[in-house]
């Protein structure tokens, strides 16, 4: 049973590594100025063979962008395209899945820990305090 599990894990890593290398090998040459994201995504699909998937209610594809790339890998192009936006992407099996970045519950200014004081009495099973607390 353990050997089978190990083989499946190794197979999963192998597939992931293959997909990563496959994405790195896709180079794009693209020059688009002030066009909708939808137009840019369509152009990337035509030139790369990847397909984009996203939720229309979450991703604003009407917003205008500009992208210039000459022989760059798809990751570099997508990083530049989505820089400064709430959009993140994942490349899986020839597909590029777009999603909205999860918002952090703690902002940078709130990143410091707050100290709070907790007081009380710890009770044993029979509802009497520990001897040290008397």
Image: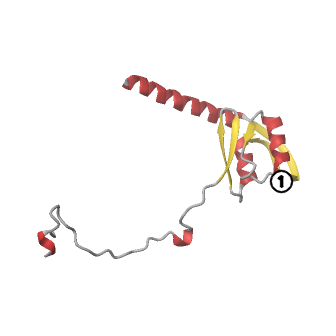
x, y (%) of residue 1? 37, 23
Q: Is residue 48 above or below residue 2?
A: below
Q: Residues within 10 Å of mark 1 (few under 14, many from 20)?
A: few
Which residue is pictured at 82% across the width and 56% down the height? 63
x, y (%) of residue 17? 58, 33
Q: Is residue 98 above or below residue 64?
A: above
Between 122 and 102, the one nearer to me in the picture: 122
Which residue is pictured at 58% across the width and 29% down the height? 15
Figure quadrant of residue 118: bottom left
* Disc 1, SS: loop
Q: The C terminus appears in which quarter of the rendering?
A: bottom left
Q: Is residue 16 left or right of residue 113?
A: right
For the image, the number of numbered tags is 1
Figure quadrant of residue 28: top right
Between 22 and 101, the one nearer to me in the picture: 101
Q: Residue furthest front?
A: 126
Which residue is pictured at 57% across the width and 61% down the height? 104
Figure quadrant of residue 29: top right
Q: Which residue is mark 1?
A: 62
x, y (%) of residue 114? 43, 73
x, y (%) of residue 11? 52, 27
Between 113 and 131, the one nearer to me in the picture: 131
Q: Is residue 71 above or below residue 68?
A: above
């Amino acid at each position: 049973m353990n050997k089978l599990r190990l083989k499946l894990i190794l197979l999963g890593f192998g597939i992931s590594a293959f997909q990563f290398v496959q994405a790195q090998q896709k180079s794009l040459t693209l020059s688009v100025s002030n066009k909708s994201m939808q137009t840019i995504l369509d152009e990337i699909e035509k030139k790369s063979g990847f397909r984009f998937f996203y939720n229309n209610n979450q991703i604003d594809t009407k917003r205008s962008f500009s992208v210039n790339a000459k022989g760059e890998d798809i990751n570099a192009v997508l990083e530049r395209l989505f820089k400064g936006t709430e959009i993140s992407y994942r490349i899986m099996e020839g597909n590029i899945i777009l999603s909205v970045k999860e918002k952090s519950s703690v902002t940078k200014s709130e990143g410091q820990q707050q100290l709070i004081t907790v007081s009380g009495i710890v009770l044993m099973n029979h509802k009497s305090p520990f001897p040290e607390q008397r």
